[in-house]
Every structure is written in C-alpha cells, then in structure tokens.
C-alpha cells in the first residue's frame, strides 16, 4: 500500500455528479443472515439515500454447494426488519432484474463469450487431478505462488472450441496481463498496487456453467449502473482482478471503498464460531432494529458531534465515507444490549414499547388483563431489562402464577416464615393495597418487631415474585392487587410447611 498519488481520479473522492449514485449489497444465501451483511447494507443504504440515489440488493447464489434456499428469504426479511428497504431487489423487482444470479446465467455466458471472442479469456480443460498435481509440483519446486500454470493460455482457439463443442468439461479463465501493475484506487486507503505477474488467471466460468463471483459481480455492477462499490476489506485482494475484468470489457470502474471488517473481542474476524452473528438470533432475543442499526452505525464511523444515540435519518444527514475509520471495530454484544436498553428506557414511547413486547408475551403463552396493566408493568420494569425477551423472563410473575422461586429468594422466604401469617392477616384487613395504605402498615409491622424494613420487605418480595430483583414493593403490591397478593402469601406459607 502506498500514499495517495496524483493519478488518483478526482471524481472518486467525491461523486460523479452527472450520474445518479447507485450502491448495492450482494450477499450469498448460505446461512443465517449475518450481522456483517447488515453492517455493509447500512453504509450502502445511507450513502445512496444521502445523495438521492438507489440502493440495490441482489443475491449471489452461484456457489451451489453452499446454497441454502431458506437463506434467501431470511436475508430479504432481515433488511425489511431493519428498515433498509432496497429500491431494487428480488422481491421488489426493478428495471435491471432478475436480481438473483442463478436466474441470470444466460447474461453471464453471453459476456464470457464476448471475452473469448476478444481473446481476453480462454477455455482450460485441466482435470481436478491435473490441477492438484500441478500445485504439488509447484510446492515441491519451492514456488511460493502455486496458482494456475496457464497450460491452456495459448492453446489454439479453434481446437479449444472444438473440444468444448464436443462436450469436454472445462472452465473459462481470464487472461491476466503478465507484466505491469494494477492499481486499486481505494477511497479510504489511496492507491494500492498489485504486480500483475503475481496475479492468477482466475476462473470466470465454472465447469457447471455457473460464473464465479468475480465475473458475475462485475457484470451485474455494470449492467445495474453501480457507481460505488462499498464492501468489506477482505475483497481488496480480489479487486485488481475485478478491475481487469472491467477493463477487458472496456467498462469504467466504480468508486472502490473497502470498509474495515467487524471483529471479535480478540480482534479476529467476526465469525459464528466465536460469537453469535445471526441477526435472526438478535431479533428473537428482542434487540430493536433501531438499536442494532444505531450500534452498527458506530462501527468504524461516528457522528460529527460525538453522540452515540442517533437515528437512521440522523446518519443519512451526517454520514460521509471519508469519516470511516480503518481501525478494526469490535462487535461487542454487551455494548449492543446496553444500547438496546437505552432505546427501551429513553427513546421508545410507552405505547410503542407495549406494541413491541406483545409478540414476545404471546410467544411465551402469556396474557394480560388490559393495555393499561401491560403499560403499568412496563413502566415499573423499564429500568430492569435490556431486551424484550429479558422483560418476559424477568416479569413472568406479573403475568402468570407459574413462576420459578430462586434459591436466594427461597432463603429469604424462610427467614420470614414466622411472621408471614400475621402479615397476611393485616394486609387482608386493608381496603386496597395502594401505597398510602401499605406503606404505613409495613413500616409499622417492622417497627413493632424491632427490625429494619428490609427484614420484612425481602421475605414478602420473595413470597410474591420468587425473586429478590423486582420493582419497588409498593409498585408490586399495587400491580398484583389484593387478591393475588393474599393467594401468593397463602401458597408461600404452604411451601414452607412442606
């Protein structure tokens, strides 16, 4: 890598002002929707919308050995959930479709034929065994580069066409220049030079008739009018090959912008082997889409005023590619949950929060007597949960009698075994359990026994909830109501007798 040079095209630092900005993501449907895909989608979406352009989603499914049919649907659902709705996609359609590569095979084959006719590509008939033997020979000869030996690079075109027409298995490879350099002008890194002699004659059409990613991506980018390729830095080493494909067709390069990879806490590349990377999993846990986008927005970028909490619209208004930091951003699940908690406590209205949590209650088979009751419970619990699923787990006693009793709570319950019957009788004498009635009763009950209020409150809390980590006692008594409080005290006393 070298510093910026005078030959860097000036338009690449900004925009081709005469052309609409078009960005894209092109995930492979091979598994769970990855948070890295959401990260790249966010930057591409925001940049396109900031400049009044288009954001395209297409699916790169040419790797048929790893293809997962359900993954296609889940990737597209993820983007809709995140509110990163594309202008063109497999579901939305558009003027440049189809947007699934396996449905565009005729397009790629036509373009491969164009390169063959130009002499920019060639057919190679090596068997897998011959390729393996050639690599082993190169290894034993001490060659560091063990790429293709270019055996068929200068093979007579007429003979190659005859063998292909006869049905002999083969691939098509690009003729990479053997001398000179290919320079990748990256928006964030400046020019990066690659010696052509070190590049391989990569396959552009496989023996099964499917293109490789390299060819399909560049053909699609050109035909779909993509102006800015904003993608992960792991593609930098492939970019010189992509540039050579574009040049072989006589097409103009897009702006290249390679963003830093998301990292595990140990700074290794973010992977599902070390961390939960599935957006579906985060969604099931009750991470809010706004919070996930906000957190991803802080990866490798920051608001000019330094604030951590910002909306998608805020990001659109203030985003700039040049402000992306090249350090390895660490994806921290604890920080994501912290930010989710901030949204729950400070951003969402109580009405909105109630609507978000309802599906989680329904999934758990829990019901509530009224909207008012649900909102009262949420208000009481709001400071105590960071995800929507955590709300369900921590507030089960508000919605069900089938709640567990924690070991610490059971110990406290035993400490209050002697006085719980009398406390129950005194509570039963009250007309209601609102705070103005229960507060003086509980304080007087503790004073009469010469103990601190906590010595009464904690056993009572354990009897009513099975937990010691709950909202304030007077909120509990008010929300549970007299009938449930007395029944739970009765049940707790029965438990202590067993």
Image (cartoon, grey):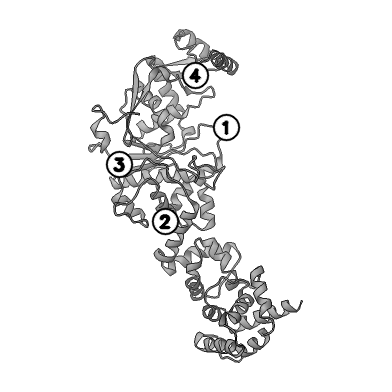
Which residue is at the front of the view, 190 or 103?
A: 190
For label 4, the residue is 144
Task: Out of 303 and 93, give the one closest to the viewer.
Answer: 303
Which of 468 and 173 lies nearest the eye of the viewer? 468
**First along the sequence among labels 3 and 1:** 1
Q: Which quarter of the rendered picture does the N terminus lie within?
A: top left
The quadrant in which the C terminus is found is bottom right
Q: Which residue is mark 2?
A: 290
- Of discs 2 and 4, which sits in the foreground? 4
Examine the image and state in which quarter residue 186 appears. Answer: top left
Precedes in sequence: disc 1 or disc 2: 1
Which residue is drawn at the image coordinates 51% and 64% (left, top)? 385
Camera-near label (4 vs 3) is: 4
Q: Which label sits on residue 322? A: 3
Asked if 51 appears above or below 241 in the picture, the reply is below
Circle 1 residue? 65
* Residue at the front extreme, as displayed: 450
């Amino acid at each position: 890598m070298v510093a910026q040079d005078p030959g860097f095209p000036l338009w690449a630092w900004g925009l081709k002002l005469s052309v609409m900005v078009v960005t894209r993501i092109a995930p492979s449907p091979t598994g769970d929707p990855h948070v890295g895909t959401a990260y790249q989608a966010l930057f591409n979406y925001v940049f396109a919308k900031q400049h009044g352009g288009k954001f395209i989603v297409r699916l790169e499914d040419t790797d048929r050995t790893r293809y997962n049919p359900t993954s296609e649907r889940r990737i597209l659902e993820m983007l809709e959930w995140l509110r990163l709705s594309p202008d063109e996609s497999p579901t939305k359609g558009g003027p440049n479709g189809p947007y699934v590569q396996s449905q565009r095979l005729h397009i790629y084959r036509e373009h491969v034929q164009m390169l063959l006719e130009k002499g920019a590509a060639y057919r190679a008939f090596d068997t897998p065994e011959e390729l393996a033997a050639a690599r082993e020979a190169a290894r034993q000869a001490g060659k560091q580069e063990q790429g293709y030996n270019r055996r068929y690079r200068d093979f007579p075109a007429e003979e190659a066409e005859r063998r292909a027409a006869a049905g002999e298995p083969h691939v098509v490879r690009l003729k990479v220049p053997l001398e000179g350099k290919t320079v990748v002008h990256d928006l964030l890194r400046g020019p990066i030079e690659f010696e052509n002699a070190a590049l391989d004659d990569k396959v552009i059409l496989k023996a099964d008739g499917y293109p490789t990613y390299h060819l399909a991506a560049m053909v699609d980018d050109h035909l779909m009018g993509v102006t800015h390729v904003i993608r992960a830095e792991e593609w930098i080493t492939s970019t010189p090959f992509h540039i050579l494909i574009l040049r072989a067709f006589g097409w103009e390069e897009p702006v290249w912008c390679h963003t830093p990879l998301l990292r595990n806490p140990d700074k290794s590349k973010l992977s599902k082997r070390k961390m939960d990377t599935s957006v579906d999993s985060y969604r099931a846990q009750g991470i809010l889409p706004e919070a996930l986008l906000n957190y991803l927005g802080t990866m490798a970028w920051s608001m000019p005023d330094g604030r951590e909490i910002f909306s998608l619209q805020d990001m659109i208004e203030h985003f700039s590619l040049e402000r992306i930091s090249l350090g390895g951003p660490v994806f921290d699940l604890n920080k994501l949950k912290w930010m989710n908690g901030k949204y729950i406590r400070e951003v969402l209205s109580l009405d909105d929060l109630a609507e978000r949590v309802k599906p989680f209650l329904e999934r758990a088979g829990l019901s509530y007597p009224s909207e008012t009751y649900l909102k009262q419970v949420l208000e009481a619990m709001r400071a105590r949960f960071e995800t929507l699923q955590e709300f369900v787990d921590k507030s089960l006693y508000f919605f069900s009698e089938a709640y567990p009793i924690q070991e610490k709570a059971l110990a406290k319950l035993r400490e209050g075994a002697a006085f719980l019957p009398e406390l129950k009788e005194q509570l039963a004498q009250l007309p209601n359990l609102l705070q103005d009635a229960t507060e003086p009763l509980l304080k007087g009950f503790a004073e009469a026994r010469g103990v601190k209020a906590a010595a009464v409150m904690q056993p009572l809390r354990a009897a009513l909830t099975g937990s010691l980590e709950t909202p304030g006692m007077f909120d509990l008594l008010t929300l549970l109501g007299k009938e449930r409080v007395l029944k739970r005290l009765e049940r707790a006393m029965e438990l202590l007798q067993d």
